[in-house]
Image (tube, rainbow, N blue to C red):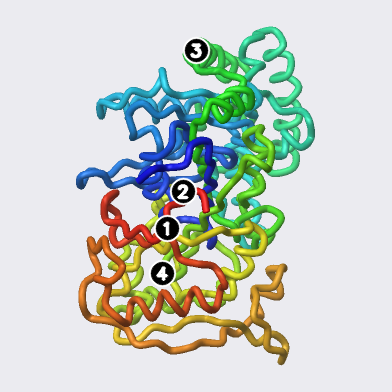
Amino acid sequence: MNITKGRNVVVVGSQWGDEGKGKLVDWLTESAQGVVRFQGGHNAGHTLVINGVKTALHLIPSGIMRAGVTCYIGNGVVLSCAKLFEEIEGLEKAGVEVRSRLRVSEACPLILPFHAILDVAREAAREKGGIEKIGTTGRGIGPAYEDKIARRALRVQDLRHPERFAQKLQELLAIYNLVLTQGLGSADLAFADTLTPYLKNGEVQFDPIYTEAMQHAKLLEPMIADVSRELNDANKTGSNLLFEGAQGTLLDVDHGTYPYVTSSNCVAGNAAAGAGVGPGLLHYILGITKAYCTRVGGGPFPTELDWEKEGTPGWHMSTVGAEKGVTTGRSRRCGWFDAALLKRSAQVNGLSGLCITKLDVLDGLSELKLCVGYMLDGEEIDILPAGADDIARCEPIYETLEGWSDSTVGVTQYDKLPINARLYLQRIEQVTGVPIHIISTSPDRDHTIMVRHPFLAP
Protein backbone atom coordinates (compact mmCIF):
# COMPACT_ATOMS: atom_id res chain seq x y z
CA MET A 1 0.00 0.00 0.00
CA ASN A 2 1.45 3.37 -1.03
CA ILE A 3 0.64 5.72 1.84
CA THR A 4 0.28 9.41 0.93
CA LYS A 5 3.18 11.51 2.27
CA GLY A 6 2.56 14.66 4.29
CA ARG A 7 -0.95 13.53 5.25
CA ASN A 8 -2.20 14.02 8.81
CA VAL A 9 -4.94 12.16 10.67
CA VAL A 10 -6.82 13.09 13.86
CA VAL A 11 -8.20 10.29 16.04
CA VAL A 12 -11.00 11.26 18.42
CA GLY A 13 -13.41 9.38 20.65
CA SER A 14 -16.97 9.88 19.46
CA GLN A 15 -18.80 8.72 22.63
CA TRP A 16 -17.82 9.22 26.30
CA GLY A 17 -14.25 7.98 25.98
CA ASP A 18 -12.85 4.46 26.44
CA GLU A 19 -13.67 3.63 22.82
CA GLY A 20 -10.37 1.90 22.08
CA LYS A 21 -8.42 4.83 20.62
CA GLY A 22 -5.08 3.53 21.91
CA LYS A 23 -5.14 0.40 19.80
CA LEU A 24 -6.07 2.32 16.66
CA VAL A 25 -3.43 4.97 17.19
CA ASP A 26 -0.83 2.26 17.69
CA TRP A 27 -2.05 0.43 14.59
CA LEU A 28 -2.15 3.54 12.39
CA THR A 29 1.30 4.61 13.61
CA GLU A 30 2.72 2.05 11.22
CA SER A 31 2.00 4.71 8.57
CA ALA A 32 3.11 7.75 10.62
CA GLN A 33 6.39 9.28 11.66
CA GLY A 34 4.99 11.33 14.54
CA VAL A 35 2.17 10.95 17.08
CA VAL A 36 0.80 13.96 18.94
CA ARG A 37 -1.23 14.18 22.15
CA PHE A 38 -3.07 17.52 22.13
CA GLN A 39 -5.31 17.73 25.23
CA GLY A 40 -6.21 16.23 28.59
CA GLY A 41 -3.90 14.94 31.27
CA HIS A 42 -3.24 11.68 33.09
CA ASN A 43 -6.98 11.34 33.69
CA ALA A 44 -7.06 9.60 30.33
CA GLY A 45 -5.95 6.01 29.74
CA HIS A 46 -5.23 4.04 26.59
CA THR A 47 -4.78 0.28 26.68
CA LEU A 48 -2.73 -1.48 24.01
CA VAL A 49 -2.48 -5.24 23.51
CA ILE A 50 0.50 -6.25 21.37
CA ASN A 51 1.28 -9.95 20.96
CA GLY A 52 -0.92 -10.65 23.96
CA VAL A 53 0.93 -8.20 26.25
CA LYS A 54 -1.17 -5.39 27.74
CA THR A 55 0.25 -1.88 28.18
CA ALA A 56 -1.63 1.06 29.73
CA LEU A 57 -0.60 4.60 28.83
CA HIS A 58 -1.93 7.81 30.39
CA LEU A 59 0.22 10.70 29.11
CA ILE A 60 2.66 9.38 26.54
CA PRO A 61 1.18 9.00 23.05
CA SER A 62 0.35 5.44 22.04
CA GLY A 63 2.80 5.68 19.15
CA ILE A 64 5.64 5.15 21.63
CA MET A 65 5.21 1.40 21.13
CA ARG A 66 6.47 1.71 17.54
CA ALA A 67 10.25 2.02 17.28
CA GLY A 68 11.50 5.06 15.43
CA VAL A 69 8.33 7.13 15.84
CA THR A 70 8.63 10.55 17.48
CA CYS A 71 5.98 11.31 20.12
CA TYR A 72 4.87 14.81 21.05
CA ILE A 73 2.99 16.16 24.06
CA GLY A 74 1.37 19.38 22.87
CA ASN A 75 0.64 22.61 24.69
CA GLY A 76 -3.01 21.62 25.16
CA VAL A 77 -2.02 18.89 27.63
CA VAL A 78 -1.81 19.58 31.37
CA LEU A 79 1.30 17.76 32.55
CA SER A 80 2.08 15.95 35.78
CA CYS A 81 5.85 15.44 35.69
CA ALA A 82 5.62 12.85 38.46
CA LYS A 83 3.20 10.72 36.45
CA LEU A 84 5.14 11.27 33.23
CA PHE A 85 8.36 9.89 34.71
CA GLU A 86 6.50 7.07 36.39
CA GLU A 87 5.18 6.10 32.95
CA ILE A 88 8.58 6.50 31.30
CA GLU A 89 10.23 4.24 33.86
CA GLY A 90 7.55 1.58 33.39
CA LEU A 91 8.05 1.59 29.62
CA GLU A 92 11.83 1.49 29.98
CA LYS A 93 11.58 -1.57 32.20
CA ALA A 94 9.64 -3.21 29.38
CA GLY A 95 12.47 -2.40 26.98
CA VAL A 96 10.87 0.60 25.23
CA GLU A 97 13.16 3.54 24.42
CA VAL A 98 11.27 6.71 25.38
CA ARG A 99 13.40 9.72 26.31
CA SER A 100 15.14 10.18 22.94
CA ARG A 101 11.78 10.00 21.13
CA LEU A 102 9.57 12.15 23.37
CA ARG A 103 9.12 15.90 22.86
CA VAL A 104 7.22 17.96 25.45
CA SER A 105 5.86 21.43 24.71
CA GLU A 106 7.36 24.19 26.80
CA ALA A 107 3.86 25.71 26.99
CA CYS A 108 2.22 22.77 28.80
CA PRO A 109 0.61 23.86 32.09
CA LEU A 110 1.89 21.82 35.03
CA ILE A 111 -0.27 19.71 37.32
CA LEU A 112 1.13 19.99 40.83
CA PRO A 113 0.05 18.18 44.02
CA PHE A 114 -2.23 20.98 45.21
CA HIS A 115 -4.32 20.59 42.05
CA ALA A 116 -5.14 17.00 42.98
CA ILE A 117 -5.74 17.99 46.61
CA LEU A 118 -8.31 20.61 45.56
CA ASP A 119 -9.91 18.16 43.11
CA VAL A 120 -10.44 15.55 45.82
CA ALA A 121 -11.61 18.14 48.34
CA ARG A 122 -14.24 19.54 45.98
CA GLU A 123 -15.72 16.14 45.18
CA ALA A 124 -15.85 15.32 48.89
CA ALA A 125 -17.54 18.65 49.63
CA ARG A 126 -20.18 17.99 46.96
CA GLU A 127 -20.90 14.57 48.42
CA LYS A 128 -21.04 15.97 51.96
CA GLY A 129 -23.45 18.67 50.81
CA GLY A 130 -25.76 16.15 49.15
CA ILE A 131 -24.81 17.30 45.65
CA GLU A 132 -24.12 14.71 42.95
CA LYS A 133 -20.39 14.37 42.31
CA ILE A 134 -19.02 15.26 38.87
CA GLY A 135 -17.12 11.97 38.80
CA THR A 136 -13.63 13.37 38.26
CA THR A 137 -10.58 11.12 38.55
CA GLY A 138 -9.29 13.26 41.42
CA ARG A 139 -6.01 13.85 39.60
CA GLY A 140 -6.11 17.63 39.46
CA ILE A 141 -6.97 18.06 35.80
CA GLY A 142 -9.79 20.58 36.28
CA PRO A 143 -7.92 22.85 38.73
CA ALA A 144 -4.87 22.86 36.44
CA TYR A 145 -6.99 24.00 33.49
CA GLU A 146 -8.58 26.64 35.72
CA ASP A 147 -5.15 28.08 36.44
CA LYS A 148 -4.38 28.09 32.71
CA ILE A 149 -7.54 30.03 31.87
CA ALA A 150 -6.97 32.39 34.82
CA ARG A 151 -3.46 33.10 33.42
CA ARG A 152 -1.70 32.06 36.59
CA ALA A 153 -0.53 28.55 35.64
CA LEU A 154 3.00 27.34 36.14
CA ARG A 155 4.16 25.95 32.80
CA VAL A 156 6.94 23.64 31.67
CA GLN A 157 9.02 26.64 30.57
CA ASP A 158 8.94 27.96 34.15
CA LEU A 159 10.93 24.92 35.30
CA ARG A 160 13.95 26.46 33.53
CA HIS A 161 13.83 29.52 35.84
CA PRO A 162 13.95 28.42 39.53
CA GLU A 163 13.47 31.91 41.02
CA ARG A 164 10.50 32.69 38.79
CA PHE A 165 9.05 29.26 39.52
CA ALA A 166 9.38 29.78 43.28
CA GLN A 167 7.65 33.18 43.17
CA LYS A 168 4.73 31.88 41.09
CA LEU A 169 4.43 28.82 43.31
CA GLN A 170 4.18 30.97 46.44
CA GLU A 171 1.42 33.03 44.82
CA LEU A 172 -0.52 29.92 43.80
CA LEU A 173 -0.20 28.31 47.23
CA ALA A 174 -1.66 31.41 48.89
CA ILE A 175 -4.77 31.06 46.70
CA TYR A 176 -5.12 27.31 47.11
CA ASN A 177 -4.58 27.28 50.87
CA LEU A 178 -7.20 29.99 51.30
CA VAL A 179 -9.74 27.92 49.36
CA LEU A 180 -8.80 24.66 51.07
CA THR A 181 -8.78 25.87 54.65
CA GLN A 182 -11.57 28.45 54.63
CA GLY A 183 -13.69 27.25 51.73
CA LEU A 184 -13.54 23.46 51.88
CA GLY A 185 -11.90 22.56 55.18
CA SER A 186 -9.25 20.19 53.83
CA ALA A 187 -8.00 19.41 57.34
CA ASP A 188 -11.14 17.33 57.83
CA LEU A 189 -10.66 15.31 54.64
CA ALA A 190 -8.82 12.06 54.09
CA PHE A 191 -6.33 12.25 51.21
CA ALA A 192 -4.45 9.51 49.44
CA ASP A 193 -1.03 8.60 50.80
CA THR A 194 0.52 10.13 47.71
CA LEU A 195 -0.87 13.56 48.66
CA THR A 196 -0.39 13.70 52.45
CA PRO A 197 3.38 14.45 52.28
CA TYR A 198 2.53 17.84 50.79
CA LEU A 199 0.11 18.78 53.59
CA LYS A 200 0.61 20.06 57.13
CA ASN A 201 -2.29 21.15 59.34
CA GLY A 202 -4.54 21.19 56.31
CA GLU A 203 -2.31 23.50 54.28
CA VAL A 204 -0.17 22.70 51.24
CA GLN A 205 3.54 23.17 51.92
CA PHE A 206 5.97 24.98 49.62
CA ASP A 207 9.22 23.05 50.22
CA PRO A 208 8.26 19.51 49.14
CA ILE A 209 6.56 20.75 45.97
CA TYR A 210 9.40 23.07 44.98
CA THR A 211 12.09 20.47 45.67
CA GLU A 212 10.31 17.83 43.65
CA ALA A 213 9.66 20.24 40.76
CA MET A 214 13.35 21.16 40.51
CA GLN A 215 14.27 17.46 40.42
CA HIS A 216 11.80 16.95 37.60
CA ALA A 217 13.17 20.00 35.77
CA LYS A 218 16.59 18.38 35.34
CA LEU A 219 15.08 15.15 34.02
CA LEU A 220 12.64 16.89 31.68
CA GLU A 221 15.06 19.43 30.15
CA PRO A 222 16.33 17.20 27.28
CA MET A 223 12.73 16.55 26.19
CA ILE A 224 11.42 20.14 26.28
CA ALA A 225 10.76 21.47 22.78
CA ASP A 226 8.98 24.03 20.62
CA VAL A 227 6.48 21.37 19.58
CA SER A 228 4.56 23.68 17.24
CA ARG A 229 7.67 24.43 15.20
CA GLU A 230 8.82 20.81 15.12
CA LEU A 231 5.42 19.59 13.90
CA ASN A 232 5.24 22.19 11.14
CA ASP A 233 8.81 21.39 10.07
CA ALA A 234 8.02 17.66 10.04
CA ASN A 235 5.00 18.24 7.84
CA LYS A 236 7.05 20.29 5.36
CA THR A 237 9.48 17.40 4.94
CA GLY A 238 6.64 14.97 4.12
CA SER A 239 6.17 13.28 7.49
CA ASN A 240 2.76 11.85 8.34
CA LEU A 241 1.41 12.95 11.72
CA LEU A 242 -1.22 11.29 13.86
CA PHE A 243 -3.04 13.47 16.39
CA GLU A 244 -4.30 11.44 19.35
CA GLY A 245 -7.28 12.69 21.30
CA ALA A 246 -8.06 11.68 24.88
CA GLN A 247 -11.50 11.07 26.44
CA GLY A 248 -14.44 11.44 24.06
CA THR A 249 -16.59 14.03 22.31
CA LEU A 250 -19.42 13.84 24.84
CA LEU A 251 -16.90 14.73 27.57
CA ASP A 252 -15.82 17.90 25.76
CA VAL A 253 -16.15 20.94 28.04
CA ASP A 254 -18.13 22.85 25.37
CA HIS A 255 -19.90 20.15 23.37
CA GLY A 256 -20.38 17.37 25.93
CA THR A 257 -22.92 16.57 28.64
CA TYR A 258 -21.93 19.62 30.71
CA PRO A 259 -21.23 19.73 33.66
CA TYR A 260 -20.51 15.98 33.56
CA VAL A 261 -17.52 16.54 31.31
CA THR A 262 -13.76 16.84 31.42
CA SER A 263 -12.01 20.23 31.52
CA SER A 264 -10.61 20.34 27.99
CA ASN A 265 -11.84 20.31 24.40
CA CYS A 266 -11.80 16.71 23.16
CA VAL A 267 -13.11 17.47 19.67
CA ALA A 268 -10.98 17.26 16.53
CA GLY A 269 -10.70 21.00 16.04
CA ASN A 270 -8.66 21.30 19.21
CA ALA A 271 -5.87 19.26 17.62
CA ALA A 272 -4.84 22.49 15.90
CA ALA A 273 -4.90 24.71 19.00
CA GLY A 274 -3.55 22.03 21.34
CA ALA A 275 -0.54 21.24 19.17
CA GLY A 276 0.18 24.52 17.42
CA VAL A 277 -0.64 23.68 13.81
CA GLY A 278 -3.06 25.28 11.39
CA PRO A 279 -6.48 23.63 10.83
CA GLY A 280 -5.50 23.11 7.19
CA LEU A 281 -3.01 20.46 8.31
CA LEU A 282 -5.80 18.24 9.68
CA HIS A 283 -6.61 16.20 6.59
CA TYR A 284 -8.76 13.33 7.91
CA ILE A 285 -10.82 12.94 11.11
CA LEU A 286 -11.36 9.38 12.37
CA GLY A 287 -14.09 8.90 14.97
CA ILE A 288 -13.59 5.86 17.23
CA THR A 289 -16.79 4.33 18.55
CA LYS A 290 -17.68 1.12 20.32
CA ALA A 291 -20.26 -1.20 18.82
CA TYR A 292 -22.29 -0.32 21.94
CA CYS A 293 -22.06 2.57 24.45
CA THR A 294 -20.28 3.00 27.78
CA ARG A 295 -19.50 5.85 30.11
CA VAL A 296 -17.69 6.25 33.45
CA GLY A 297 -18.89 8.52 36.22
CA GLY A 298 -22.04 10.58 36.53
CA GLY A 299 -24.19 12.22 33.90
CA PRO A 300 -27.06 11.34 31.54
CA PHE A 301 -26.87 8.20 29.39
CA PRO A 302 -30.08 7.68 27.35
CA THR A 303 -29.43 4.07 26.23
CA GLU A 304 -28.05 2.79 29.55
CA LEU A 305 -29.04 -0.78 30.44
CA ASP A 306 -29.19 -2.66 33.73
CA TRP A 307 -25.59 -3.74 33.23
CA GLU A 308 -25.18 -5.11 36.76
CA LYS A 309 -27.96 -7.70 36.38
CA GLU A 310 -26.56 -11.09 35.39
CA GLY A 311 -27.85 -12.56 32.16
CA THR A 312 -28.95 -9.25 30.61
CA PRO A 313 -27.47 -7.67 27.45
CA GLY A 314 -25.90 -4.92 29.59
CA TRP A 315 -24.25 -7.50 31.83
CA HIS A 316 -22.99 -9.28 28.72
CA MET A 317 -21.38 -6.05 27.47
CA SER A 318 -19.88 -5.31 30.87
CA THR A 319 -18.37 -8.75 31.46
CA VAL A 320 -17.40 -9.83 27.93
CA GLY A 321 -16.12 -6.32 27.19
CA ALA A 322 -14.17 -6.16 30.50
CA GLU A 323 -15.57 -2.68 31.05
CA LYS A 324 -13.32 -1.23 33.73
CA GLY A 325 -11.70 2.21 33.47
CA VAL A 326 -8.00 2.14 32.54
CA THR A 327 -7.16 5.08 34.83
CA THR A 328 -9.49 4.54 37.80
CA GLY A 329 -10.59 0.91 37.64
CA ARG A 330 -14.22 2.05 37.98
CA SER A 331 -16.89 -0.02 36.25
CA ARG A 332 -18.21 1.51 33.06
CA ARG A 333 -21.94 1.89 32.61
CA CYS A 334 -23.11 0.01 29.50
CA GLY A 335 -25.92 0.49 26.99
CA TRP A 336 -27.09 0.05 23.41
CA PHE A 337 -25.44 1.84 20.49
CA ASP A 338 -26.69 5.41 20.19
CA ALA A 339 -26.68 6.56 16.56
CA ALA A 340 -28.38 9.86 17.42
CA LEU A 341 -25.51 10.60 19.79
CA LEU A 342 -23.05 9.79 17.03
CA LYS A 343 -24.78 12.31 14.76
CA ARG A 344 -23.86 15.00 17.28
CA SER A 345 -20.25 13.77 17.36
CA ALA A 346 -20.07 13.72 13.56
CA GLN A 347 -21.38 17.29 13.48
CA VAL A 348 -18.93 18.84 15.96
CA ASN A 349 -15.88 16.87 14.76
CA GLY A 350 -16.46 16.86 11.01
CA LEU A 351 -15.83 13.11 10.91
CA SER A 352 -14.35 11.69 7.71
CA GLY A 353 -14.93 8.10 8.76
CA LEU A 354 -15.66 5.77 11.66
CA CYS A 355 -13.77 2.99 13.33
CA ILE A 356 -16.06 0.53 15.12
CA THR A 357 -14.35 -1.23 18.03
CA LYS A 358 -15.35 -4.18 20.20
CA LEU A 359 -17.68 -5.65 17.59
CA ASP A 360 -16.72 -9.07 18.98
CA VAL A 361 -18.27 -8.20 22.37
CA LEU A 362 -21.72 -8.43 20.77
CA ASP A 363 -21.13 -12.03 19.63
CA GLY A 364 -23.82 -14.31 21.05
CA LEU A 365 -26.57 -11.74 21.62
CA SER A 366 -29.77 -12.91 19.90
CA GLU A 367 -30.97 -9.39 19.15
CA LEU A 368 -29.55 -5.88 19.20
CA LYS A 369 -31.19 -2.53 19.68
CA LEU A 370 -30.04 0.59 17.87
CA CYS A 371 -31.08 4.03 19.12
CA VAL A 372 -32.06 6.18 16.12
CA GLY A 373 -33.57 9.14 17.99
CA TYR A 374 -35.43 10.21 21.14
CA MET A 375 -38.74 11.41 22.47
CA LEU A 376 -38.18 14.67 24.31
CA ASP A 377 -41.15 16.39 25.93
CA GLY A 378 -43.51 14.69 23.48
CA GLU A 379 -41.49 15.58 20.39
CA GLU A 380 -39.45 13.16 18.28
CA ILE A 381 -35.86 14.27 17.60
CA ASP A 382 -33.09 12.51 15.67
CA ILE A 383 -29.94 14.02 17.22
CA LEU A 384 -28.61 14.26 20.78
CA PRO A 385 -29.62 17.56 22.40
CA ALA A 386 -26.88 20.00 23.35
CA GLY A 387 -27.65 20.23 27.09
CA ALA A 388 -27.35 17.62 29.84
CA ASP A 389 -30.74 18.54 31.34
CA ASP A 390 -32.48 17.83 28.03
CA ILE A 391 -30.46 14.66 27.48
CA ALA A 392 -31.53 13.37 30.89
CA ARG A 393 -35.18 13.61 29.79
CA CYS A 394 -34.66 11.82 26.47
CA GLU A 395 -36.42 8.50 25.92
CA PRO A 396 -34.57 6.47 23.26
CA ILE A 397 -36.33 5.32 20.10
CA TYR A 398 -35.00 1.88 19.15
CA GLU A 399 -34.81 -0.26 16.08
CA THR A 400 -34.36 -3.99 16.72
CA LEU A 401 -31.91 -6.01 14.62
CA GLU A 402 -31.03 -9.69 14.67
CA GLY A 403 -27.82 -10.65 16.44
CA TRP A 404 -25.32 -13.34 15.47
CA SER A 405 -23.92 -16.46 17.11
CA ASP A 406 -20.72 -16.91 15.08
CA SER A 407 -17.51 -15.49 16.56
CA THR A 408 -16.07 -12.32 15.06
CA VAL A 409 -12.92 -12.43 17.24
CA GLY A 410 -9.81 -11.90 15.14
CA VAL A 411 -11.63 -11.52 11.80
CA THR A 412 -9.58 -9.36 9.43
CA GLN A 413 -11.75 -9.39 6.28
CA TYR A 414 -15.10 -7.64 6.02
CA ASP A 415 -16.76 -10.38 3.97
CA LYS A 416 -15.83 -12.95 6.62
CA LEU A 417 -18.06 -11.24 9.22
CA PRO A 418 -21.46 -12.86 9.93
CA ILE A 419 -24.15 -11.41 7.67
CA ASN A 420 -26.06 -9.95 10.64
CA ALA A 421 -22.92 -8.21 11.86
CA ARG A 422 -22.53 -6.61 8.44
CA LEU A 423 -26.19 -5.57 8.42
CA TYR A 424 -25.72 -4.01 11.86
CA LEU A 425 -22.71 -1.99 10.64
CA GLN A 426 -24.52 -0.93 7.48
CA ARG A 427 -27.46 0.35 9.49
CA ILE A 428 -25.11 2.41 11.67
CA GLU A 429 -23.71 4.01 8.51
CA GLN A 430 -27.20 4.73 7.18
CA VAL A 431 -28.47 6.38 10.35
CA THR A 432 -25.34 8.40 11.18
CA GLY A 433 -24.37 9.35 7.64
CA VAL A 434 -20.72 8.52 8.33
CA PRO A 435 -18.92 5.69 6.49
CA ILE A 436 -17.26 2.92 8.51
CA HIS A 437 -13.65 2.69 7.36
CA ILE A 438 -12.13 0.46 10.08
CA ILE A 439 -13.49 -2.36 12.28
CA SER A 440 -11.70 -3.77 15.32
CA THR A 441 -12.47 -7.38 16.22
CA SER A 442 -10.36 -7.77 19.38
CA PRO A 443 -7.93 -5.69 21.47
CA ASP A 444 -4.96 -7.16 19.58
CA ARG A 445 -3.15 -4.81 17.20
CA ASP A 446 -3.53 -7.08 14.17
CA HIS A 447 -7.20 -8.00 14.58
CA THR A 448 -8.42 -5.14 12.42
CA ILE A 449 -10.47 -4.86 9.23
CA MET A 450 -9.42 -2.01 6.94
CA VAL A 451 -12.08 -0.76 4.52
CA ARG A 452 -10.36 2.54 3.70
CA HIS A 453 -7.00 3.69 5.04
CA PRO A 454 -7.04 7.19 6.62
CA PHE A 455 -3.52 7.94 5.40
CA LEU A 456 -4.49 7.46 1.77
CA ALA A 457 -5.59 10.62 -0.02
CA PRO A 458 -9.05 10.41 -1.65
In the rendered structure, the answer to whether residue 408 lies left or right of residue 283 reads left
Q: Is tag 1's residue or tag 3's residue first in the polypeptide sequence?
A: 3
- Provide the residue designation for mark 1: 452
Q: Are marks 1 and 2 in contact (CB under 8 Å)?
A: yes
Residue type, numbered disc 2:
Leu
Camera-nearest label, 1 or 3: 1
- Identify the residue position indicated by label 3 in the image: 222
Q: Amino acid at mark 3?
A: Pro
Do the numbered discs 3 and 2 sit on residues whose CB atoms are within 8 Å?
no
Question: Disc 3 to disc 2, how far (Cα)?
Answer: 34 Å
Kind of residue at disc 4? Ala
Task: Give residue 93's position: percent from left, percent from top.
Answer: 27, 25
- Where does residue 102 sit, x and y in percent of width and height? 46, 24
Mark 4, residues whose alpha carbon is within 10 Å: few (<14), some, or many (≥20)?
many
Task: Tell me the residue that label 2 is attached to.
Answer: 456
The reply to whether residue 130 is visible in this rendering is: no
